[in-house]
Image (cartoon, rainbow, N blue to C red):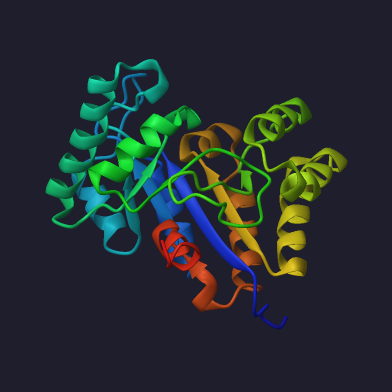
Amino acid sequence: MPLNQDVIFSCSIDDGHPSDMKAFELLSRHGLNATFFVPIRNREGMPVMPAADLREIASRFEIGSHTHDHCFLNKLDLPVAQFQVMEGRKRLEDMLSRTVPGFCYPGGKYSRVHAQLLRQAGFAYARTTTNLCFDSGRRRFEMPTTMQFYPHRRSVYLRNFVKGGRWHRRQAGLRLALENDDWMLRLYALFSHARKQGGVFHLWGHAKDIDELNAWPQFDQFLGHVAQRVKPANRLTNAQLATRAFLRG
């Protein structure tokens, strides 16, 4: 099948769970790009991958920060939020011996104050959990996504749609999400729409969820589908996506 010349694909995997290595292997096998957002610890008790695995992933993909302890920033006093942002990034950079340009808000919980905090801390961009978008958004520190790799109920998409704003730009995504009962058909339908309009398809998820869903074969199949339809130059990390979208500021 001919490669589409316009659609951009980016993928991000959150939380730094040891199962991220499975996502790393599959994304590598299909020649796709991705960003892994990793906390240093997870206050919810979930394990975080060891430094050796993190460095292996960093040899191929982008690593982004996810706070020090996987904390929801909107639940913290500002000095504590600042510590979580700064220390999480510092520890990652110490482990990797490289700059960490990107950040993802745990749980998608943040305010404009936190976006400004990230800017002041020297991050280049931040990713949210807003779904149903086929572009990179309007703000460098509030980049949206297209779909989470998870079988959400329709009500979840409706709440996300209402909360995320930019409703006129997300109506097509919502329609497709509501039309398709099966979550994998929903995934393919949204990707097909991105291809038709030459937009961005940003997939995100948690490797731990894929484990619990026993959905690694489906994840593998979808990545293969994407690799056949997106040219290599348009397979981007989140940082590359941000750079392309916000090159002028």
Query: In the rendered view, would you say 99 is above or below 209?
Result: below
Residue at image position (20%, 44%) is 92
Judged left or right of residue 151, residue 55 is: left
Residue 214 image position (x, y, % from top left): 59, 38
216 vs 75, nearest the viewer: 75
Q: Is residue 30 visible?
A: no
Judged left or right of residue 20, residue 151 is: right
Judged left or right of residue 2, residue 236 is: left
74 vs 30, nearest the viewer: 74
Residue at image position (49%, 32%) is 108
Which part of the image, by quadrant, shows the C terminus?
bottom left
Image quadrant where residue 58 sits: bottom left
Image quadrant where residue 90 sits: top left
Residue at image position (66%, 56%) is 134
Residue 243 image position (x, y, % from top left): 42, 64
Residue 176 image position (x, y, % from top left): 82, 47
Which part of the image, by quadrant, shows the N terminus?
bottom right
Query: In the rendered view, would you say 86 is above or below 92?
Result: above
Judged left or right of residue 165, residue 141 is: left
The outermost residue toward the right is 179
Query: In the rendered view, would you say 57 is above or below 77?
Result: below
